[in-house]
Amino acid sequence: MTITGASIIAGEHISGGNGTTEATNPATGESLPPRFTFVTSAELNLAATAAEAAFDLYRRTAPEERAAFLELIAANLDECKSEIVTRAHLETGLPMGRLEGEHGRTTGQLRLFARELRLGAHQEVRIDEAQPERPSGPAPDLRQRQVPLGPVAVFGASNFPLAFSTAGGDTASALAAGCPVIVKAHNSHAGTAELAGQAIAQAVRDSGLPGGVFSLIFGPGATIGQELAAHPSIKAIAFTGSQAAGTALMRTAAGRPEPVPVYAEMSSINPVIVLPGALAADSEAVASGFTASLTLGSGQFCTNPGLVFVPKDSERFTGIVADSLSRAVGQTMLSSGIRQAYTDGLGRLERGGAELVATGADGPTENAPAPALYLTTSAHLRATPDLQDEVFGAAALLVVYDDLNDLKTTLEALHGQLTITVHATETDHEQVRAILPILERKAGRLIVNGWPTGVEVNHSVVHGGPFPATSDARTTSVGTLAIHRFQRPVSYQGFPDGLLPEPVRDDNPWRLPRRVNGEPRLP
């Protein structure tokens, strides 16, 4: 495939007339051709109206048709894996091995949603049959299913150029739900975005679907991104990125004549709680696991452990972590802008009164800053809310707590999180039980004796949490539950069988699981 620098609008490459940008190799500072053209408002409107025109045709596809379409996207991505991974490496500085794994995650979640479509549980069919002789009065025949919302705007993430971008989980789940997708590409990995977009557009053509099922556009987030979010054809928004950009999209979506849902993953420092028993049992193992998780990928994960609670008298643990980090070398970050934001974040910690206890060495490139470790007390954390602001990168704040009551009080003051981890032995179980209700209120995924980096993509995972971790704590952006973000229930009362849509007909042509008169019934 050839990178053209043009947007893909309803299957056609269109060079925009609203300025240009060029990707940059963050390890070398070199520009990466070609130049990418930004779409105009008129060109964005072409994509949005094409998506709206394609919606009713696409939403009527049977589960098997849609599943085969997702599998074809995955197969196309596999065919051009080498090109995609190589370009992503140049645009992000991420290691080839990491990107090959991310490519597998990307195709794997497409195939996972294909399996989910064939299972059919996401349709959530419920049937209450008519009761004409009911003593309290006749009851009508009522049937319910989930229908897709409409065209979805997906915003690519900087830190996952494959799994959270053009062909990532938001796109996969929206397409699985029956929604056309318009991706606003992340400009820092534009070439990777276009290659993945070509794979999707080819699958649209080969599946005989209308071109408006998928479009990929380039442009500034503050202008074109906001215009996309405000367009009346868009019925939902999926975003992964900064809290500032996510809340800006939330305001735009809420201020429309027809407000639409925004599923934004934004900010999380993913607290880790080390209880006394775990520290006494094997402080070296906990310390080494923490250091590895913190520095993985230069700390550029939304699940990076940026806050660690340790009991008083934990100097040995602190010393082990500090010694390990002092020998660590910085890794190339995704861009110069992200590297500067990391430096600014360290400044916030210092201005907030946190004590710098260890720092490593800068890496060999300009955008490879050293990892850093800071220290404070639980009382100071409660008194200084800014210390909870995310520092995107390999920096963490150790927080010393006095006892269980001090820990509980501080946990209550935490913002919403994607994850919270507890390290405990059996002697700590009563303390875990005491804090568990707080943890459930604060995060979407709770972990015992593990680390938050590394997110399983399956049926049970939750990658979400209370604000500011996400804009809607009721759902997830990873795993098959993500499909529900782009659906809504519709009930059919008194319909003759010949007028009912396939999922709720008596003959059940799609062989879906359903609940009939309150009782589960398999096909």
Image (cartoon, helix red, strand yellow):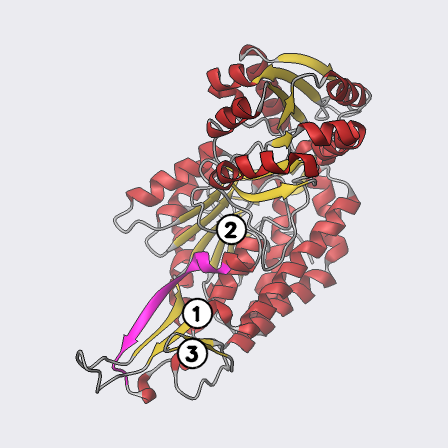
Q: How far apart are the two marked residues, 3 and 2, measured between alpha carbons? A: 25 Å
Disc on res. 124? 1
Q: How far across and down, in percent of the image, does residue 471 sit?
A: 43, 42
The foreground one among 54 and 289 is 289
The foreground one among 496 and 181 is 496
Residues marked 3 and 2 touching at CB (< 8 Å)? no
Mark 2 secondary-structure assignment: loop
Q: Residues in magenta?
A: 483-495
Circle 3: residue type: Pro
For the residues carrying marks 3 and 1, which lies nearer the camera in this image? Answer: 1
Image quarter (top left, top right, bottom left or bottom right) of the N terminus: bottom right
Point out the tag, 3 or 2, that comes first from the N-terminus: 2
* Circle 1 crowding by C-alpha within 10 Å: few under 14, some 14–19, many from 20: some
Name the residue tied to disc 3.
503
Q: How far across and down, in percent of the image, does residue 260 sit?
A: 34, 51
Q: How far apart are the two marked residues, 3 and 1, measured between alpha carbons? A: 9 Å
- Classify residue 340 as left or right of residue 28: left
Name above or below for residue 328 compared with residue 445.
above
Residues marked 3 and 1 touching at CB (< 8 Å)? no
* Circle 3 crowding by C-alpha within 10 Å: few under 14, some 14–19, many from 20: many
Q: How far apart are the two marked residues, 1 and 2, measured between alpha carbons? A: 18 Å
Which residue is painted at 39% across and 47% down in the image?
229
Disc on res. 476? 2
* Circle 2 crowding by C-alpha within 10 Å: few under 14, some 14–19, many from 20: many
Point out the tag, 3 or 1, that comes first from the N-terminus: 1
